[in-house]
Amino acid sequence: MNELSAILSQTMDRLLVDHVSKETLRASEDGVWPAALWQALEENGLTQPLIPEDRGGIGAGWSDAFIIVQATGYSYPPVPLAETLAAGWLLSQSSLDVPEGPITLIDDGHGLTSKEQMADGQASAVPWGSHVAHAVALTNDNDRWRICVIETETAKTTPDMSIAREPRDHVVFNGASGVSAAFPMAADNSPARLLGALVRSAQMAGAMRKALDMTVQYATERLQFGRPIAKFQAIQHMLAVTAAKVAEAHTAAEYAFRAMDSADGNLSFATFDIAAAKIVCGEAVEQVADAVHEVHGAIGFTEEHDLHFTTRRLWSWRGEFGTEAFWAEELGRKALSRGAENLWPDLTAHQAEY
């Protein structure tokens, strides 16, 4: 960990301890925006770390940003920090300015178009759509990507929630105010979906680590037959397998962030690592969530226990910005197009870059 990563880690840990509590999470589920938390994140430069310093950011790399995004998975602050970070980076690659405040990222806009400073179309399950002033989307025009910034206050938003009770709103943009510009980086998939899958992978990795930590603590405190259940071999085996899955997810997500640092103007370079991370983390969610709830038993399913804050987010994030099936199909399609003779060179080429 370099000096900047260490500073970001310490700052995130301090802010999340100070501003995120069970009360904060429950208030957010009732629609309360945690203004003090967002203000603290902005004041410490954590909302736009990837923006160059001459454009108001701190000029961090994606490997540094991994520290921030994983922390949002571990402590799940109820704000669109991961989306704002990703959207800000996308905008910084174009000629468009990065607006202040929280920004959301639109995965798949149905018939979304942007021209003459107006946006049309609609989008479902928009993260925090009713809490942000701007939304970023990518449209494809004759195989060329365009990036759009849409003012959400000029759109019609219908509030909705995910299984995690986080805002996932339906937004209709017919005639909404917006600006667009050419997106200069090459990409096989929507850059918005790629970046969304990237940050969700890191968030899932962080949340699974939190679930494991909670479960180890519970197993060492819960007594059965006069001794902690962590002393039983079956529980030890379950925790060991879970720890391996958490480590696997962490590694996959971290490698995907490193790939972004090596992309050098070509998002297609990072597609393999991002897709692999989303697949690995998504598959791990099922096994990790199953194991931690089995160890906790009935108490883990109650509203009073904190475990549901973690596992509900895992189940929600797993399906966002492309499922495992979607990304596996994308990898398969790309491998077939490259031919059998390129499969092994393609698999090993990225290792040399890191």
Image (cartoon, grey):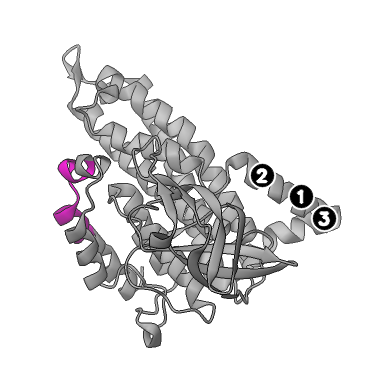
Q: Residue at x 62, y 70 (%)?
A: 146
In the displayed structure, 342 sits above or below 212; it is: below
Residue position marked by numbered label 1 in the rendering = 333
Q: Quadrant of residue 326?
A: top right
Question: Around disc 1, counting alpha carbons within 10 Å, would you say few (fewer than 14), some (14 to 19), or many (20 or more)?
Answer: few
Mostly what secondary structure, the magenta segment? helix
In the rendered image, the vertical position of residue 310 relative to residue 252, given as above or below: above
- The amino acid type found where label 2 is placed reads Ala
Give SS at disc 3.
Answer: helix
**Would residue 259 be counted in the magenta stretch?**
no
Number of disc labels: 3
In this picture, residue 189 sits left or right of residue 89:
right
At x 31%, y 48%, the residue is 74
Query: Which residue bears the numbered disc 2?
Result: 328
Question: Do residues under tags 2 and 1 come within 8 Å of each other at their CB atoms?
Answer: no
The reply, left or right, for residue 168 in relation to residue 119 is: left
The residue carrying mark 3 is 337
Callouts 3 and 1 close, C-beta under 8 Å: yes
Q: Tell me the magenta residue range.
A: 13-25
Q: Tell me, yes or no, whether the highlighted magenta stretch contains residue 17.
A: yes
Q: Is residue 252 visible?
A: yes
